[in-house]
Amino acid sequence: MFGCLRHVAPFATCFVAAALLTHSAGCATGRSRGVELGLQPFSAAELQIREAARDARYRLRVGDTFAIDFKYQDELDQHNVTILPDGRFTMAGMEDVRAVGMSIPELDSLVTAHFARDYRNPELSVIIEQLGKQSVYVIGEVRDPGIHELPWTNHGVPQAVALAGGFLDTAAPGQTLVIRVTEEGYQYRRCDLSHLEKKGLRDAAALDLQPFDVVYVPRSAVGDIAFFTENVLGSLVDLGGLFWDVYAITHLESVNVITR
């Protein structure tokens, strides 16, 4: 259940700008190039959505790389097996197998059944070595709002905004909001990107993204984070799909090592 984004109508960001409080005690500190950090607990309704998402399982995607680790037949071990753009993979002993959309236990069962033709009770593990491109939401005052895929080698907030076509003239880059779903609630970062090209940022690491982060570029300051998450975010993003995706990617089954 990846990529669940509701249609963002042209008037949506106008509604957001009108609905949000632009000044409150929660506003940014005003320090140029700074990053304000905070945590907004889930509402009761959001907790129910979060609980429902606990049945989620990660589904393999194009670009994911995995290894097959045999317990007793070391000579059969496979590494750097990549799911190709057509959703299939090829490795020694198995050719042209479709895996995209499978859970890791399902792939484990498929590979085990294949090698069981020639080996008695093969014991093996599927280990994710590298995740492929992952999706982030970029919404608000950008030219192409929606879900965009970022490579792991270049996955910061400025790159996400660039993939979304850049800021509109109506954007307030200095109030860019990054929202991440965590176990405790919405972790948010208010980032000042207004002078990024000329002056850089004090803490560049604060601009890193993880899969399914939400980058929101407003027209003006989002003063009330609680109001935003409870009343506006759900009108722009399918929270059920977002929670499902986040839980799935942070709870990979049968994984010993993830290298990024």
Image: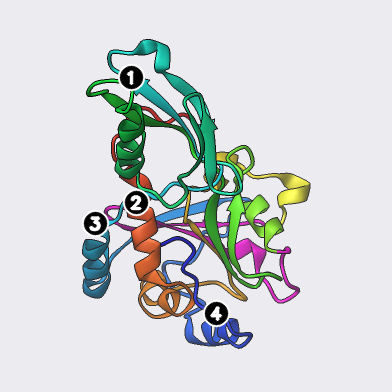
* Residue 39 visible within the image: no
Residue identified by numbered label 1? 70
Q: Label 2 sits on what residue type?
A: Ala
Q: Label 3 to label 1, Cα distance in Å?
A: 30 Å
Which of marks 3 and 4 precedes in the sequence? Answer: 4
Which residue appears at 59% of the width and 75% of the height? 220
Name the mark on residue 248: 2
Residue visible at 57% across and 79% down? 8
Secondary structure of residue under mark 1: strand
**Hey, what amino acid is under mark 3?**
Arg
Q: Considering only order in the chain, which callout, 1 or 3, is on the residue closer to the N terminus?
A: 3
Query: What residue appears at the point 44 percent right and 74 percent down from the top-left corner?
Result: 233
**Badge 4 or badge 1: first in the primary sequence:** 4
Callout in the foreground (1, 2): 1
Measure the C-alpha gap from mark 3 to mark 2: 8 Å
Q: Is residue 168 one of those drawn in magenta?
A: yes
Q: Position of residue 129 (x, y in %)?
A: 46, 30
Q: Position of residue 11 (x, y in %)?
A: 60, 88
- As drawn, the label of residue 54 is 3
Q: Which residue is mark 4?
A: 7
Indicate the secondary structure of the residue bearing disc 4. Answer: loop
Number of residues whose C-alpha sits closer than 10 Å to that of mark 1, classed few (under 14), some (14–19) or many (20 or more): some
Q: Position of residue 74 (x, y in %)?
A: 37, 12
The x, y position of residue 243, in whole percent, is 35, 61
Q: Amino acid at mark 1?
A: Phe
Q: CA distance from mark 2 to mark 4?
A: 23 Å
